[in-house]
Image (tube, grey):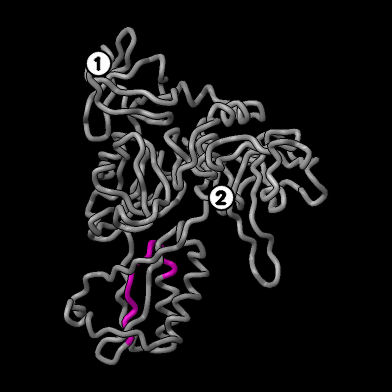
Amino acid sequence: MKVKNKIKLFAPALIFLSACQNKEEKAPYPELNALVESVRLKYVPDRRDDVYDIEVVEHDGRPVIKGVTTVEEAKTDLLEQIRENNPAAIDSIGLLPDETAGEKIYGVVNVSVADVRMGASYAEEMGTQLLLGTPVQVLQHDDWWRIKSPEGYVAWISGSSFVRMTKDEFNDWITAKKIIFTDDYGFGYENADEKKRVSDLVFGNIMKLEGDSERFYKVSYPDGRVAYVLKSRSRPYGEWLASLRLTEESILEKALSLKGIPYTWGGTSVKGMDCSGFTKTVMLMHGIILARDASQQAKTGLPVDISNGYDNLRPGDLMFFGKKAQDGKGERIRHVAIYKGDKEFIHASGYIKINSLDSTKANYDELNTREFVRASRIIGAVDTKGIWCINNNPLYKEQKQEENL
């Protein structure tokens, strides 16, 4: 999945910038704005990973550096460089999380599948989805909430889709006993009788364990709702995690279990998924969090040499498709799949299906065969860049005062 970069600037509420003054602002400092861009490329080359929404405008004849960022080092470096060029420059850069987030700078997703968008509106492009029980860091409020997901993806979520928490509340949730829903689809019920529903559930949904009866776990949601979930469709979270093994066979088994699910741009659940949402879901079924988009996943794992054909590929390897770097243009990754073996691969294209690299086969995929540019291996690379075992991801851990997400 290739996400379009959309930028929205939010200036901190400093006393010298009133609403009427902002109307007079203009951007007459091309050399200073060039410095802004050079610092961004140094610290935040991919805007999906961190926030760096900064520009230089003019106010009363002086340059004002305004905007927000999550990277304190970037702010410091930028201010030093700009003031070397223009000592009169005014700092109006806010660090996120900012005062709009208040004390509740953590959160947990509260619905089975939450849409997360690239801007603070339902009209904005969907960037990804997060599952019930997923922890997030809260950065900023502007009608919607700007958050950072466990894989580091920065985007916006509606306040009705998650519950904001203080650090203590968040730690209570993180350290509590939980269950995980392991079936494709199901429900939480008001009572232990499969009648009135509390919510729908999908694979990967995590809820707090409150008790159990003969056939049901009693659970609670982040907002405190109580429900009963069938034991046959769920497992204690720790037990589930301890049972997982990442092997070629298990990757293919999980990938094939998703066949036929329709393609959904930004999707990461059994309700619908895009190409990188598919690979993420397969890895989540192994207790692993994978970087979000295909172009990000291409930078992870152990590189597999495909310079002389397909012989080095192993089942479960990730295959990446797009345009190779040439004529001064960088590589462009547009699609990702899982290698099945025998020159076949599994991917989300219209729906999750199997295609072939072999031109003699009925399921031959000419375009992707022609644009197959690289491959990587997740087996042997867990807990390297962009690949986390859930329990080793910073947002799935109890938060200490000194920890910096």
Q: Secondary structure at mark 1?
A: loop
Q: Which amino acid lies under the numbered mark 1 shown in the image of this protein?
A: Lys
Q: Which amino acid lies under the numbered mark 2 shown in the image of this protein?
A: Ala
- The tag on residue 214 is none
Measure how far apart labels 1 and 2 are at the Cα level. 41 Å
Q: Are marks 1 and 2 in contact (CB under 8 Å)?
A: no
| Magenta stretch contains residue 66 | yes
Q: Nearer the viewer, mark 1 or mark 2?
A: 1
Q: Residue 36's quadrant in the figure?
A: bottom left
Residue found at x 26% / y 12%: 193
| Magenta stretch contains residue 275 | no
**Which residue does the numbered mark 1 point to in the structure image?**
195
Picture coordinates of residue 247, whole percent (x, y): 64, 29
> In the depicted view, which residue is nearer to us: 299 or 78?
299
Judged from this view, the residue extending furthest toward the bottom is 61
Q: Secondary structure at mark 2?
A: helix
Q: Residue 211's quadrant in the figure?
A: top left
**Which residue does the numbered mark 2 point to in the structure image?**
294
The residue carrying pointer 1 sits among few (fewer than 14), some (14 to 19) or many (20 or more) residues within 10 Å by Cα, namely few
Q: Residue 114's quadrant in the figure?
A: top left
Side of 134 relative to 315 (left or right): left
Residue 185 sits above or below residue 27 on the image = above
Q: What count of labels does the image hold? A: 2
Picture coordinates of residue 157, whole percent (x, y): 31, 49
Residue found at x 41% / y 14%: 232
Residue found at x 70% / y 48%: 366
Picture coordinates of residue 205, whole percent (x, y): 38, 31
> In the depicted view, which residue is nearer to us: 77 or 332?
332
Residue found at x 36% / y 52%: 117
Q: Which residues are magenta?
A: 63-74
